[in-house]
Amino acid sequence: MISQCSKVLRSGSLLKSMASIRTWRCEVPYCSVGASPDPGPTGTVCHTPVMLKEVLHYLDLQPGQVVLDMTFGGGGHSKAILNTIPEITLLALDRDPTAINLAGDLEKEYPGQVKPILGRFTELLPLLSHMKIKERSVDAVLLDAGCSSMQMDQAQRGFALSKDGPLDMRMDGDRYPDMPRAADVVNTLDQQALASILGAYGEEKRAWKIASAMVEARRSTPITTTQQLARVVAGAFPAAAMYARKDRLNRPSHVATKTFQALRIFVNDELNELHAGLLAAQTALRPGARMVVITFHSLEDRLVKRFLQGGDMSNLDEFHFEQKQKKAKFLRGPKEKSEHWTAIKRKVVTPEKQEMLENPRGRSAKLRIVQRL
Ligand SMILES: C[S@@+](CC[C@H](N)C(=O)[O-])C[C@H]1O[C@@H](n2cnc3c(N)ncnc32)[C@H](O)[C@@H]1O
């Protein structure tokens, strides 16, 4: 069903009715690579790299090696790598032009060491080949999945439930003018398709009710802003349930949180992208090289775990159905290996309590560390 929705969205029919491309450019005036996470004068907040100490430790980089940061974002992890390891070459990929501008700044700071690459995981291998980087040659990969704070905190990007902005959510910004925004999804798909998206990508139990509320609301006015959507979703819940859900720090969580997650994953095709990213890393890494993967929600983590174990990846849209299955131990076989990977650490690494308090956004992070066979 979701793949069908994806096809519908990617076909021209929906897109013809889309508004003309906005020329808005994401400005991150206060956010430079490695800047503090304090809000700037414009309210911009920089991205705080998650489990930085652990990432540096587990990547185990040596001077002169080539490391691929597949999710450059605000460049926090990348900058720490460049600061710590002499003569490292850093390949800095991101699908967001704003992030790649920051990688350009870092290139000026470390001339000859940083190679910014604008593109998606699905585009990575041709991009590397174009740069004459051979398969099985990269010494380490970092993949820190999901969104950056720079994306979340810019109201105009339309990711955040807490900030009013156009309902956009495209990580690529305006790179692909035909790419549907979240507003196109909620205003165009039928109730069944919307419910499927919310169920599959948000693991939202009230998916059908929320989808019905969206369809009802858009009859009078299209849903075009984040706050409008938050209100529509809230309308599908009894008043008492509004903040009854709790996050991992036991703080009240808005009832629309899962809906926002689902739409973001759908708009950016995040699960297919993640799978493609893991496959590309598998091709790019040399035998013996390490990969560190950080995920932020259970769909991502289950996908990564299954991929590394060499499991069946044919139905990425149905990962939510596995929730209640007995937990399989990560790479636990007679030799703790899959065909392509072995675990450096079998247990998942999570942020220390202090880090969770200092950077609540990273509270749900899970880090896995493997070695290419
Ligand atoms: C959590 S942030 C990374 C933060 C970074 N490690 C730091 O320290 O600032 C994730 C980044 O990955 C990028 N990203 C997500 N999916 C991607 C994809 N499929 N291809 C390329 N970049 C992607 C996002 O645009 C975002 O900038």
Image (cartoon, rainbow, N blue to C red):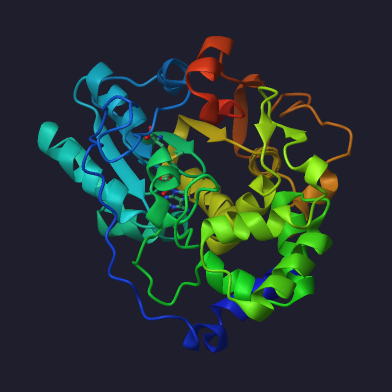
User: Nearest the camera: 252 or 344?
Assistant: 252
Q: Height in image: 206 above or below 190?
A: above
Task: Give how far across and how far down residue 83 sits, in percent.
Answer: 23, 20
Q: Quadrant of residue 150?
A: top left
Task: Give how far across and how far down residue 120 sits, in percent.
Answer: 42, 57
Q: Quadrant of residue 53?
A: top left
User: Nearest the camera: 312 or 233?
Assistant: 233
Residue for point 21% across, 43% down: 29
Residue for point 34% across, 47% down: 93
Left or right of 297, for residue 119: left
Left or right of 322, for residue 132: left
User: Nearest the camera: 77 or 224?
Assistant: 224
Task: Give how far across and how far down residue 82 sits, in percent.
Answer: 24, 25
Q: The C terminus appears in which quarter of the rendering?
A: top right
Task: Give how far across and how far down residue 194 sits, in percent.
Answer: 72, 68
Which quarter holds ligand 1? top left
Q: Height in image: 344 above or below 247?
A: above
Q: Height in image: 188 above or below 361?
A: below
Q: Quadrant of residue 103?
A: top left
Q: Quick check: can you spot residue 314?
A: no
Residue for point 23% across, 35% down: 32
